[in-house]
Amino acid sequence: IQTAPIAITGDPVLYQKAAPVIAFDVALHNLTQTLMATMLQARGVGIAAPQIGVSQRLFIVASRPNERYPDAPLMEPMVMVNPVLLSGSSEWELGEEGCLSVPGKRLSIARHLWIDAQWQDLQGNTHSGRLHGFVARIFQHELDHLDGITLIERIT
Ligand SMILES: O=C(NO)N[C@@H](Cc1ccccc1)C(=O)O
Ligand SMILES: [Zn+2]
């Protein structure tokens, strides 16, 4: 399966508002496979389509313990199309984040402790649920990417 180069700080695609996904077709399936393979190759625990140069509202949340995040919880990777943050806890928590598009940096970022999210799967079915802790953190990080926000914009 193909991987793709990861856009890094300064690449305009990282600062655009991504477009909603409207076609739940084979191209979306292929894009998701490339996104997943790229994330795994980079030892990521999440990745957003704009990071491989595709300005569409799609990301993967795939927390699992690895050398970059030894304490990360293990979960089934979630492919989230047209994700929406419905609400977030009033309580925020500071935590270390890395970004595959901001190589070599770990920054302390405040995120909601839990969030209620809604998204579509690759078949276009709508789902919703509450995410907690590190998984909620990854979701919020990836959603920022869909709105043209990277870690650097989050600290300034
Ligand atoms: O760059 C990305 N995703 O956009 N990948 C990050 C995801 C992430 C998000 C929040 C906290 C830790 C890690 C990574 O280091 O795997
Ligand atoms: Zn990132």
Image (cartoon, rainbow, N blue to C red):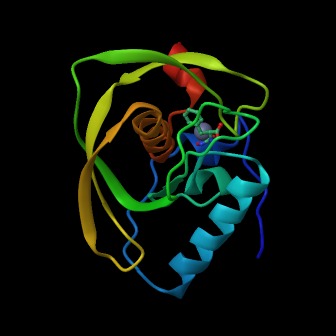
User: In terms of depth relative to the viewer, which is nearer, 134 or 104?
Assistant: 134
Residue 98 lies left or right of residue 84; in this view the side is right
Residue 122: percent from the left, percent from the top? 42, 75
Residue 79: percent from the left, percent from the top? 47, 62
Quadrant in which the N terminus appears: bottom right
How many discs mark residues in the rendered view? Answer: 0
Question: Residue, x 76% and y 36% (percent of image)?
Answer: 67
Q: Is residue 139 above or below residue 94?
A: below
* View extreme (bottom): residue: 26
Residue 5: percent from the left, percent from the top? 79, 56
Q: Is residue 71 above or below residue 28?
A: above
Q: Quadrant of residue 114?
A: top left
Residue 106: percent from the left, percent from the top? 68, 21
Q: Quadrant of residue 23?
A: bottom left
Question: Residue, x 28% and y 74% (percent of image)?
Answer: 125
User: In terms of depth relative to the viewer, which is nearer, 75 or 32?
Assistant: 75
User: In terms of depth relative to the viewer, which is nearer, 76 or 50?
Assistant: 76
User: In terms of depth relative to the viewer, which is nearer, 73 or 134?
Assistant: 73
Question: Residue, x 21% and y 19% (percent of image)?
Answer: 90
Which quadrant of the frame does ligand 2 lie within?
top right
Residue 65 lies left or right of residue 62; in this view the side is right
Question: Residue, x 52% and y 77% (percent of image)?
Answer: 28
Q: Is residue 81 above or below residue 154?
A: below
